Image: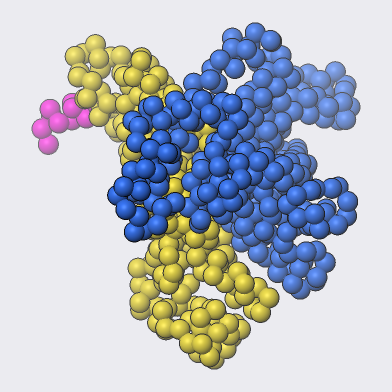
Chain colours: A blue, B yellow
Amino acid sequence: MLFYALKRLIYVLPVAFGVSVVCFLLVHITPGDPLTAVLPVDASAELQAQMRAIYGFDKPLPVQYVIWLGKVLTGDLGTSIATGRAVLTEVSRAVGNTLILSAVATIIGFFLGCLFGFVAGYYRDSAMDRLASTLSVLGVSVPHYWLGMVMVIIFSVQLNWLPATGAGPGGSAEWAWDWDHIRHLILPAVTMSVIPMGVIARTVRALVAEILSQDFILALAAKGLTDRGIFIHVVKNAAPTALAVMGLQLGYLLGGSILIETVFSWPGTGFLLNAAIFQRDLPLLQGTILVLAMFFVLLNLLVDVMQTALDPRIQRG
Amino acid sequence: MAVGALDNKNVIAPIQVSDGYWKGVLRRLMRDPVTMGALIVILLLVLMAIFAPYLAPADPFKSSMLRRLRPIGTPGFPLGADELGRDMLSRLIFGARLSLFMGVTPVLMAFVIGSGLGIFAGYVGGALNTAIMRTIDVFYAFPSVLLAVALSGALGAGIFNALVSLTIVFIPPITRVAESVTTQVRNRDYVEAARASGASGLTIVRVHVLGNVLSPIFVYATSLVSVSMILASGLSFLGLGVRPPEPEWGLMLNTLRTAIYVNPLVAALPGVMIFITSISFNMFSDGLRSAMDVRA
């Protein structure tokens, strides 16, 4: 097991390296020079050359990459052009908020998805199955940023039950699990949970149907096991895959929270990305994307190792 | 008819089988009311986009400060007016043009590029396969929304840049599917037989591989159209895709966001269009998958 985890870790290194190259190159695919964002339009050629030397843009790309990577590995993601603060500080503050939002959304989505998936898988082709399947198709097809707007229209504008934007009195700085903060979390988290709900419901439905059709279930029933006992067997067999899908969904939400965060002005990484893009704050853009992508890579690794640990039938080597 | 022609038909028996196969697919599709319904909705949307100038009751660009945010049902504005007093119905109809174009094009482009790349990687195998697939893995390591936003954010707003970003987002998943089905087909006996009978690599790919791998890849690609619609409109919603004053559903949703306090029903309309389109493509793709009996 430990050996397998180590081996997987070694496989991840080239991917992590590739991800860092893509993030590095992001700044260089921008039209013109990365410096055009910083410099005034009428800057003299001399000043441009000077700035280029200061930022190291006069060196060949591979050299620039090595220097940049060296800094990144020591935790230096550069300085935000817009705020002058270290990118790492900005990102780590925002990541916390995004993590809260995505984790809560994933948990809600997981429970609802499992509920619908189990019902649909157990009572295949019944009315309940059709209802659950329809809900999961709706979940994966809905433009979630629009759903967010609709939620705001219903629960904030019309009913005035919950706040429409922001993350509570503490703003982006501090989060606490009290009602003042949680009421700000409800709408964005529920909106976001629709995506994992749909995906997990689909997966679980297929899993349950497949497990129920297997011979060992028939054998257990023939042995006289109660429905509850069989249910436990189904859960045990479906759990590793369902949990793996949940882990991956968390990763997708972490990286894809920008649309929801924009709708609800949630002060997370998506909000940061939005600001970075429209202020042409390239170091901030690059740093945020690098951190989010690395999170996703690590999460994938973790999910894979966990799945192997949970399911002894998976022989990987 | 010459006897030789008949003989020839018998030699290439798999083609006869695939002829029957397609008839079966069509028959199964016609019997499936949900899929046919979804297909009809998609066709109606396409017709709406093509004939937008004839269908729209008003000029989608003509604004009027006096008629801002008229509610649904106002005389002359059946679906109300937007934040600049433009006729919503006309803008929704014209919006189908850019929205459908932005949603479908990236998947088509990625289908061509990704299939080519995946079939090549799957067929040649070996070190080239490893090189291609490991590069694809790197792009797979980004969540799709993040990659789309990162690329179009770095490239800058605009229709072309958004299309390029989305195409890059969809190439890796299509390449993976193409590579895996090609690798399976490559090891089948009939490919072995073709090689033993002296067929060149290109002929084998053209005759034996393409026909067997394109349909699973195509079915997979159709399942991405719904995601692509949501992502493309999402980019415009963020201000990274289509620019004002062009009518596009995602962008309309963005500019109407502040209107939810004044006229919530009108503000939500463009999203309804995105939803209808995305769900139709999703259901059509599901139906196509089961009709073609593809497990990819």
Query: Residue A1, relative to residue B78: is it above or below?
Result: above
Task: Give how far across and how far down residue A100 sits, in percent.
Answer: 75, 44
- Asked if residue B11 lies in the magenta stretch, the reply is yes
Relative to B7, is A86 above or below? below
Magenta stretch: residue B204 in it? no
| SS assignment for the magenta stretch, majority | helix
Q: Residue at x 85, y 18 (%)?
A: A223
Look at the picture and state if B215 lies above or below A241: below
Q: Is residue A122 left or right of residue B201?
A: right
Q: Is residue B151 above or below residue B237?
A: above
Quadrant housing residue B212: top left
In the image, B76 versus A258, the foreground residue is A258
Residue at point 65%, 64% (across, down): A149
User: Which of the 4 quarters of the picture holds residue B47?
Assistant: bottom left
Quadrant assignment for the N terminus of chain B: top left
Q: Residue at x 45, y 84 (%)?
A: B63
* Pick the front one: A105 or A74: A74
Q: Nearer the viewer, residue A138 or B103?
A: B103
Q: Which residues are magenta?
A: B1-12
Looking at the image, can residue B154 be seen? yes
Residue B39 visible, this angle: no
Find residue B186 and report its horizontal and vertical position in percent: 35, 19
